[in-house]
């Protein structure tokens, strides 16, 4: 090859390197082989996953744990479609990932070639942007733009589909096509007038409350949030996505609100006169029935995405921009305030409505209680189901980016691969996946990936041989008619882990819990602990009526 | 209620799909859609007419504005804009009808753009109601086939929405 010329495959690697990418999660196939052929010449690490869905979740977990863009790779056709659940998960939770897929050669596109699928068409509603690269000279620019789009404004997944012959084609590095994006200018700085109005409104408030969500998580605004809350003495409640954005042991913290929210948190938003919602979508799991949500309150809605303003709940005072900047401005402008009476009331409610689960036996709350004693400040990753709600209530997180969960899409099977991604991003931290057996079975093949690269995550399977959350819904809303929720007890998850080369521990008695967790965390290898739950009691509180204050606990 | 939305975009593949899917996802039926190049190279402008709830439509507009290749999306009010639509009608007639049809052509300011035997192709331009009116008048004759372009709109006055 002549000097100054490079192939598409080389150009991809050069661009990834210049973006600072350190690791890729992927699974090759015919249409992406030219790229893989070049990869060993780069310092970028590659983790071979056992299924592409896992590759996408790993990139997602990596992104959430580190704040950097996660990158996953797949081949054309089924490789690309297997990414779809992972992309949708990242899209719903605004997680910055870039997915690169191989495509059949340009001349074959549209001819129903082997392993051809219109993946840019398929992923339109679940990506922030996607590209089908038709000219090799577009590649460097498209990759740069993809990283920029994924990681700025409201973050999200971007997919780049690259035909095999584009990866092979040569071009001159100085003939790179550029096309700036005129229509993409995310608002970063909050409008000063709106911020001043918000300060005035907060000053008049007697019962203010802050709702913190995923936007605070992704913009690393925890410090600013804490400063505002402490200076103005405002209680904090969180959405599921916002759990690790505020120290849970703080006296201003009143837990998660919403459908499975704490009574104190739901009371706070139902009685507040001013609500400051920071980086939250106010989705249906957070608000409960919209027509009764916080009717008495004035809503200050801070979000980087203007389309979120008044989407679900009419906002009295929107501030569009990056939460970190806006919280800093608010902190500067707000006077020191005291709301002790209001906070005292919430504390009373909190005391009158403690978490209802009994602590004992091999039960999820008890396991989480013991886990909290054994390990300090881990990154907790969860799957989706009852264990996820238990984890959101029964274990505290104290530092940012420490609670990683599929909040919006509710993707079962997210946990194991996301935990692997998180551990790759943060090898210095203990990473624990709290899973249910239903979720675990969906992506447990990735334990083999963790073993191959020795990524020591600890998976705690809350095993009731049942789809627990579905069981709970049938219990409460379907007259206890349990349909299609019970698994037979043929699978031994500990032995399954061992078959893949990871230590597996089965726990059947309460006295074994602590030892098993200690053993799992100290073995230095990926491990699976199969907790045989004694009961599959429901997770409460749970809103059952037409307001957040009609609940079962 | 009927709404007209104007969208200035980059002229790039996939824009139309992304725009139309935002409407279809919420169950809006696009009544008419027209798109073409603008005075700026590489930029296209859409005029979309939809019927639906104003609040939901405002949400769609915000979502449109979020699309990476959309430069601007805005609603256009009828009073403050000039609207035009174009239609072609192929009409078959007998000798007796010729005179009547010619009268209607004059009345609605249509033009005959093609004629062969007893078949004429007529062209009509005007706002939506003018086109509706022409169709109403011609429907008593044998319309073989017809087509409408969909509405295009520009705001009156010196304002230029496409400048940023």
Image (cartoon, coloured by chain):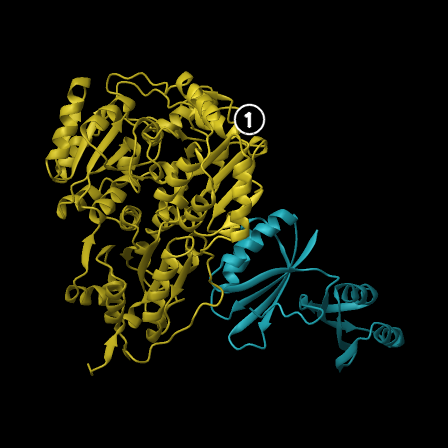
Chain colours: A yellow, B cyan
- Is A261 in front, or is A449? A261
Q: Quadrant of the N terminus of chain A?
A: bottom left
Q: Residues within 10 Å of mark 1 (few under 14, many from 20)?
A: some
Residue A425 is situated, as x and y percent measured from the top left of the image, at 22, 49
Mark 1: which secondary structure?
loop
* Any part of residue B145 in sight: yes
Q: Quadrant of residue A5?
A: bottom left
Indicate the chain on which mark 1 is placed: A
Residue A85 is situated, as x and y percent measured from the top left of the image, at 36, 47
- Is B87 in front, or is A319? A319
Mark 1, residue position: A546
* x 59%, y 66%: residue: B46
What is the residue that sits farthest to the bottom in this orientation? A2
Vertical comparison of A488 with B34: above or below: above
Q: Quadrant of the C terminus of chain A?
A: top left
What is the residue that sits farthest to the left in this orientation? A523
Residue B139 is situated, as x and y percent measured from the top left of the image, at 80, 64
- Is A110 in front, or is B41? B41
Residue A255 is situated, as x and y percent measured from the top left of the image, at 39, 29
């Amino acid at each position: 090859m002549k000097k100054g010329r490079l192939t598409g495959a080389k150009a991809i690697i050069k661009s990834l390197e210049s973006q600072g990418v350190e690791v890729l999660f992927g699974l090759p196939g015919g249409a992406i082989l030219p790229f893989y052929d070049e990869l060993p010449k780069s310092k970028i690490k590659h983790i071979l996953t056992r299924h592409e869905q896992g590759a996408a979740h790993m990139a997602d977990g990596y992104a959430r744990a580190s704040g950097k863009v996660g990158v996953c790779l797949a081949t054309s056709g089924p490789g690309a479609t297997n990414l779809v659940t992972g992309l949708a998960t990242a899209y719903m939770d605004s997680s910055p990932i870039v997915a690169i897929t191989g495509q059949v050669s340009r001349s074959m596109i549209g001819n129903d070639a082997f392993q051809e699928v219109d993946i840019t068409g398929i992923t339109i509603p679940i990506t922030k942007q996607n590209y089908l690269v038709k000219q090799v000279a577009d590649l460097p620019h498209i990759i740069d733009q993809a990283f920029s789009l994924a990681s700025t404004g409201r973050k999200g997944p971007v997919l780049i589909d690259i035909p095999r012959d584009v990866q092979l084609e040569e071009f001159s590095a100085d003939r790179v096509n550029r096309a700036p994006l005129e229509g993409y200018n995310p608002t970063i700085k909050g409008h000063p007038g709106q911020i001043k109005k918000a300060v005035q409104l907060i000053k008049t408030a007697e019962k203010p409350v802050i709702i913190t969500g995923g936007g605070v998580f992704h913009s690393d605004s925890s410090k600013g949030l804490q400063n505002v809350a402490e200076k103005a003495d405002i209680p904090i409640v969180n959405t599921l996505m916002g759990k690790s954005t505020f120290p849970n042991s703080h006296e201003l913290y009143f837990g998660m609100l919403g459908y499975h929210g704490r009574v104190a948190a739901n009371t706070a938003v139902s009685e507040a006169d001013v609500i400051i919602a920071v980086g939250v979508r106010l989705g249906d799991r957070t608000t409960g029935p919209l027509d009764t949500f916080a009717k008495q309150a004035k809503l200050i809605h801070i979000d980087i995405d203007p389309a979120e303003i008044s989407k679900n709940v009419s906002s009295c005072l929107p501030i569009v921009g990056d939460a970190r900047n806006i919280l800093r401005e608010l902190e500067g402008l707000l006077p020191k305030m005291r709301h002790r009476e209001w906070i005292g009331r919430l504390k009373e409610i909190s005391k009158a409505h403690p978490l209802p689960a009994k602590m004992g036996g091999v039960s999820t709350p008890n396991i989480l209680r013991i886990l909290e004693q054994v390990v300090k400040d881990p990154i907790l990753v969860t799957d989706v189901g009852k264990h996820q709600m238990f984890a959101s209530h029964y274990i505290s997180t104290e530092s940012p980016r420490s609670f990683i969960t599929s909040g919006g899409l509710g993707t079962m099977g997210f946990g194991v691969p996301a935990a692997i991604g998180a551990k790759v991003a943060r090898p210095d931290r203990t990473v624990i996946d709290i899973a249910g057996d239903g979720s675990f079975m969906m992506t447990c093949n990735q334990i083999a990936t963790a073993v191959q690269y020795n990524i020591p995550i600890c998976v705690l399977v809350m095993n009731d041989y049942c789809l627990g959350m579905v069981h709970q819904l049938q219990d409460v809303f379907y007259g206890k008619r349990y349909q299609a929720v019970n698994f037979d007890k043929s699978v031994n998850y500990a032995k399954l882990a061992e078959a893949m080369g990871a230590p597996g521990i089965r726990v059947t008695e309460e006295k074994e819990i602590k030892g098993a967790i200690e053993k799992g965390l100290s073995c230095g290898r990926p491990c699976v602990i199969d907790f045989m739950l004694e009961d599959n009691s429901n997770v409460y509180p749970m809103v059952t009526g037409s307001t957040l204050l009609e609940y079962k606990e | 209620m009927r709404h007209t939305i104007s969208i200035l975009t980059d002229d790039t593949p996939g824009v139309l799909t992304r725009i139309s899917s935002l409407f279809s996802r919420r169950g809006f039926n696009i009544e008419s859609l027209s798109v073409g190049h603008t005075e700026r190279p590489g930029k296209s402008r859409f005029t979309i007419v939809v019927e639906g709830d104003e609040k939901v439509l405002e949400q769609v507009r915000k979502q449109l504005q979020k699309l990476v290749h959309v430069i601007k999306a805005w609603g256009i009010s009828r009073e403050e804009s000039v609207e035009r639509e174009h239609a072609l009608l192929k009409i078959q007639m007998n000798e007796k009808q010729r005179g009547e049809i010619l009268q209607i052509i004059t009345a609605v300011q249509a033009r005959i753009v093609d004629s062969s035997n007893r078949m004429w192709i007529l062209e009509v331009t005007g706002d939506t109601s003018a086109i509706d009116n022409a169709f109403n008048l011609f429907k008593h004759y044998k319309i073989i086939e017809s087509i409408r372009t969909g509405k295009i709109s520009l705001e009156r006055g010196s304002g230029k929405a496409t400048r940023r």
